[in-house]
Image (cartoon, grey):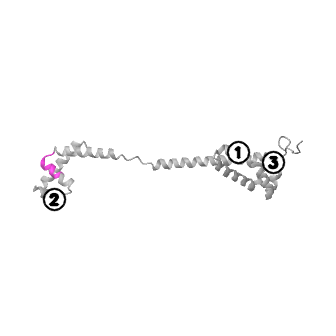
Amino acid sequence: MSSVVHLAGPHRRGPDLEELVAKTAFGDHDAFAVLYEAVTGQVFGLVRRVLRDPAQSEEVTQEVLLEVWRTAARYRPERGGVMTWVLTMAHRRAVDRVRAAQAAADRDQRAAAKAHTPVYDEVAEQVEGRLEREQVRRCLRTLTELQREAVTLAYYRGFSYREVADLLATPLGTVKTRMRDGLIRLRDCLGVSS
């Protein structure tokens, strides 16, 4: 016959949690160590079900047990058992961690959305620019020779009205009139509203 006594099952008595909390409230480290061993497994299990992440679950479990150490004097037996008190703290702390993580993810997503700039389509820009230049060239060909020369000298080469008049050996008033008429024809040809 075996002389080993099995302590498992319904006849096994665990430590008196209320007594351990009362001693912990007075700073008894040994009582807290026993309390810690008695509740850690269930606290970790609950937190792990809420968080799903083992590392974060360990961290939150430690935070909860530290809170038990700090707040043991606030435990009120008339409000419920020690395990209920500890597990309530654990559940709240785990839910707070989930909410904080979600808030951070939402904040990051909003920041990323604000920082998002549309992708620059270089090919489309080049094609559009080429089409606009071709349209301007086509419209310039509809101007008279004097209008085309005056507009080209003033707008593409940067000469003033007076310099254009000197280069074309044409009176200043005539150059201004031809340029005004040429610009009106260009505007109409390009479909630009005034």
Q: Which residue is at a point 37% across and 47% down the rendered structure image? A: 120
Q: Earlier in the sequence, mark 1 or mark 2?
A: 1
Q: Earlier in the sequence, mark 3 or mark 2?
A: 3
Mark 2 residue element: helix
**The quadrant where residue 4 appears:** top right
Which residue is identified by label 2? 163
Part of the protein shown in magenta: 143-151
Mark 1 residue element: helix
CA–CA distance in space, label 1 to label 2:
88 Å
Vertical position of residue 137 compared to residue 159: above or below: above
- Locate residue 128, reporting x and y percent: 29, 44
Quadrant occupied by the N terminus: top right
Identity, as a three-letter code, of the amino acid under mark 3: Pro
Q: Nearer the viewer, mark 3 or mark 1?
A: 1
Question: Is 1 left, or right, of 120 in this rendering?
Answer: right
Question: Is 80 left, or right, of 160 in this rendering?
Answer: right
Which residue is identified by label 3? 77
The answer to whether residue 163 is visible is: yes
CA–CA distance in space, label 3 to label 2:
100 Å
Which residue is identified by label 1? 45
Q: Residue furthest front?
A: 1
Q: What secondary structure do most residues of the magenta stretch adopt?
A: helix
Question: Is 173 left, or right, of 102 in this rendering?
Answer: left
Residue 189 painted magenta? no
Q: Earlier in the sequence, mark 3 or mark 1?
A: 1
Identity, as a three-letter code, of the amino acid under mark 2: Glu
Q: Nearer the viewer, mark 1 or mark 2?
A: 1
Identity, as a three-letter code, of the amino acid under mark 1: Gly
The reply to whether the C-beta atoms of the residues labelled 1 and 2 are less than 8 Å apart is no
CA–CA distance in space, label 3 to label 1:
23 Å
Mark 3 residue element: helix
